Amino acid sequence: MSMLEIENLSVEPADGGQRILNNVNLTVDFGYTNVLFGPNGSGKSALLRAIMGFGDYKVVEGRILFNGEDITNLSVDERAEKGLGIMLQRPPNMTGVKLSSLIKAISKENMDIDKVAEELDMKRFMDREINVGFSGGEIKRSELLQLIAQNPCMYLIDEPESGVDLVSINKVGTKIQEMLNANLECIGERSVKGKSALIITHTGQILDYLEADRAYIMCSGKIMCSGNPRKLLDEIKSQGYEECIRCKLNQI
Amino acid sequence: MQTKSNLKQDLKERAEKALDKKASYGQDFDLSEYEIAPSESEQVETLTEWDEKTQKQLLNTGVVPSGEGRSGSLVVLNNAVSYSSTKSENVELIPTKQAREKYDWLDDYAWNLVPVDADKYTAATYLQQPNGYFIRAHAGKKETLPVQTCLLLGNKEVSQTVHNIIIVEENAELEIITGCTTKEEVMSGLHLGISEMYVKKGGKLTFTMVHNWAEDIGVRPRTKVKVEEGGTFINNYIALKPVKSIQSYPTAFLDGKGAVARFNTIAVGHPGSELDLGSKAVFNAPETKAELISRTITTGGNVVARGEMEGNADDAKGHLECRGLVLSDDGSQRAIPILEANLQNVELTHEAAVGKIARDQVEYLMSRGLSEDEAVGMIVRGFLDVGIKGLPDELENDINETIDKIGEHAM
Ligand SMILES: Nc1ncnc2c1ncn2[C@@H]1O[C@H](COP(=O)(O)OP(=O)(O)O)[C@@H](O)[C@H]1O
Ligand SMILES: [Mg+2]
């Protein structure tokens, strides 16, 4: 059993249209940090949103297993309850909803969230409406603060480095690394090995801050290959994603 | 020149002629169907003499029965003042009738902003020679504690008529909380309320009105405000409970240079409720400013949010925001913004939006572990948060409970 198993998953937009994901298979073992590479528009965000259960996508084939349990048809809050947490690439503007209200509603009692807010330089945003007028880096830091308050068992993280300046990347990268290694309250094997994560990265920059165990490459809604994160990143950097497609075609 | 009695005769004739004049907006009420509410009611020594339920009704409209934290209290029960007390030298708070006997000069203020023949409701109210509250903040005095007043409907199927006059003298500051409600067993009736407010040079008035009526009550407030040079008028209006029909269109005339008005309206249209809520600013002097904010929700009722700004002077600046949430297929939301500039140097803007809660916002909160109800509640609470400050805890709690119920029934 793994923390997350995606089996043969195909996904379409809920309001109809072309398939976005095609027979995706992907696994994240307990305590593993896996990364997902892929060019823009390949379907990475769609996969993460489908795992979390957001209503803009519908699963037309396959299933999602979390901690051995089929969660394909659960609601978003039920998945959160089971221990999934997500950092969105482009979260919605939450007009009227203050960051402090949400943090207060989701924080676990035993957590010094003020300290985390301080470290992420988010204290002065607590009275602001979530994401409204936030810069790229502020959005990521706010997402991270929420995730830490939420303290899930597994993290789904969508492009933590996109639209972020260097100072913020440093803060965000370091904090994610800390978060993945933080003590957890999850039962069983997970608590021995640490938390699990699936991190989307377009540039691979996040790998400067954390060790990943396994990488997948996605192109046009399909998983092309998987392997050692650094090796795959080197190959992408030297040969581009076109090579992945060629490579995949050669396998057939 | 007209003599006083001539003037009164004239007003009386105008009112009589207007007795059948329908209002421009809102459903029409046949006044003959309602008995006139008793013009005498029991006097109480303190509001804590009243039964628990009535005290709770008061608390939920922001009126503290003990009078704690208030500079004065006055309650109009039906058509009579049944309680009045003032703790501060900075303000005068007495029944309108008493004030008009005491001060001849009030003839220049009474029925000066609200025309007696505006519609049948103003006409009927005038002809009944109503009581109400008179509040005066003395010149240069800044009272830190609010004055509270309550308009309480105590009998079934009657019409209550009140006439309120507020004068904030030069450089004075005052906050008023007015709660309008019914005794618990009173479900039907009519409330007609005339309010004339004067903010003199450099004065500041914050007026917060909470409406907690009942399912079958018709409400026709008629409010006009005159703001002089450098004066500020802030109006907060909260109507979150079921009611049959409220139609109001308070208007601020910014008559002195640099006068400022702000209207905040938050309201919920429940099934069977008609809410026609407007606010209007008339910029009659240079450099006047106004902000009109309306946040309304329908859970099945019909809501009209009107906002109007009329720019008649140079460098007038105003912004109007009407946002409406639709949480049911049965209700409707109409936002009707009107901007009128009669000069070049006027800047009036508006934004209006009506629609449902965005699904992605709800799911975003759900992905943090909130249930759907909690997520909707949090969004609704944020939507209604226009920064009204200084409400008593009981009222805040009651507002939160109302919002939680809305969250449970939405989507
Ligand atoms: N709701 C939607 N309806 C239709 N097409 C969509 C929708 N969301 C995403 N897509 C399309 O699906 C593809 C994958 O998008 P996305 O998952 O955002 O890519 P990535 O995150 O890899 O850059 C893109 O071509 C995008 O335009
Ligand atoms: Mg993406």
Image (cartoon, rainbow, N blue to C red):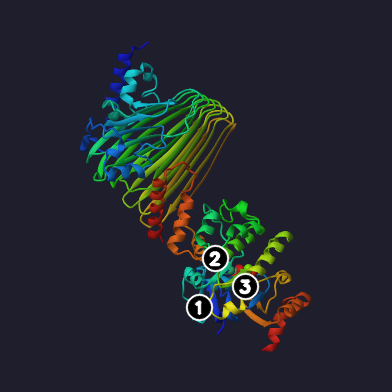
> Which quarter of the rendering shows the C terminus of chain A?
bottom right
Question: Ligand 2: which quarter?
Answer: bottom right
User: Residue A162: percent from the left, percent from the top?
Assistant: 68, 64
Q: Is residue A165 left or right of residue A192?
A: right
Please state if B409 lies on the left or on the right of A193 as rendered. left
Residue denoted by label 3: A44
**Residue occupying the far top of the picture:** B1
Residue matched to label 2: A150
| Residue marked by disc 1 | A60
Mark 1, mark 2: which one is toward the viewer? Answer: 2
- Can you tell which quarter of the image residue A156 is in? bottom right
Q: CA distance from mark 1 to mark 2?
A: 30 Å
Residue B15 position by quadrant: top left
Q: How many marks?
A: 3
Q: Residues within 10 Å of mark 3 (few under 14, many from 20)?
A: many
Distance CA(mark 2)–CA(mark 3) = 23 Å
Q: In terms of depth relative to the viewer, which is nearer, B155 or B361?
A: B155
What residue lies at 47% left-to-right and 23% top-to-bottom? B169
Sequence-wise, the earlier of marks 3 and 1 is 3
Kind of residue at disc 1: Val
Numbered disc 1: secondary structure? strand
Asked if disc 3 is less than 8 Å from ligand 1, the answer is: yes
The numbered mark 2 sits on a residue in which chain? Answer: A
Residues A239 and B180: in front is B180
> Eyeballing the image, is B66 above or below A101?
above
